[in-house]
Image (cartoon, rainbow, N blue to C red):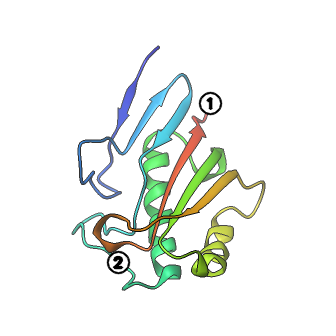
Amino acid sequence: MTRQIVHTEQAPAAIGPYSQAVVSNGVVTTAGQIALDPGSGELLGGGDIRAETHQVLKNLKEVLNAAGSGLGQCLRCDVYMVDLGEFDAMNEVYASYFEVDPPARVTVQVSALPKGARVEINAVATVLA
């Protein structure tokens, strides 16, 4: 079994001892992405769930692209939210990134996320042939 560590400057650097993604046997597993600016590492969105969700999915897309995959190859996404009362707003933005054949998904409420983020998303995807 081979393991390839993925790193791209187009997405935020890891803020702990983990990789942005790992590819093994044609499958990409990403770390969770929050709404960090890839350049500054600062949280974007000002607490607005829609703005944060857009940035999270932009970051996730860049990590998947660096791994030779993409949002269209996602098998599953896990969504972590601080407030499920914001689910409809997050879901509206999420749906705009997965308009056709969306992946399986889990969405859960958590008590807190790194850097005060409102939403975090990770993915499992296939590598493009």
Could you tell which of marks 1 and 2 lies nearer the N-terminus?
2
Badge 1 local density, few (<14 within 10 Å), some, or many (20+)? few
**Residue shown at the point (68%, 61%) measured from the top left:** 98
Give the number of marks: 2
Q: Residue furthest top?
A: 1
User: The residue tagged with tag 1: helix, strand or loop?
Assistant: loop
Residue 2 vertical placement versus 35 (above, below): above
Query: Dividing the picture into quarters, in which one does residue 44 lie?
Result: bottom left
Figure quadrant of the C terminus: top right
Pointer 2: what residue? 44
The nearer-to-camera label among 1 and 2 is 2
Instruction: Kindly identify the residue that appears in the image at 43 percent across and 17 percent down.
Output: 2
Residue 70 drawn above or below residue 59: above
**Nearer to the camera, 85 or 5:** 85
User: Residue 57: x, y in percent?
Assistant: 51, 63
Seen in the picture, residue 63 relative to 82 is either above or below; the reply is above
Given residues 38 and 49, the one toward you in this image is 49
Q: Secondary structure at mark 2?
A: loop
Counting from the top left corner in percent of width and height, residue 91 is at: 65, 72
| Residue at image location 48% in from the left, 47% down from the top | 65
Residue type marked 1: Ala
Report the residue marked by disc 1: 129
**Which amino acid is tagged 2?**
Leu
The residue lying toward the viewer, choosing from 62 and 90, is: 90
Q: Nearer the viewer, residue 105 or 52?
A: 105
Image position, residue 100 (x, y; %)? 77, 59
Q: Are dots 1 and 2 in contact, CB under 8 Å?
A: no
> In the orientation shown, which residue stands out farthest toward the front?
111
Label 1 to label 2: alpha-carbon separation: 34 Å
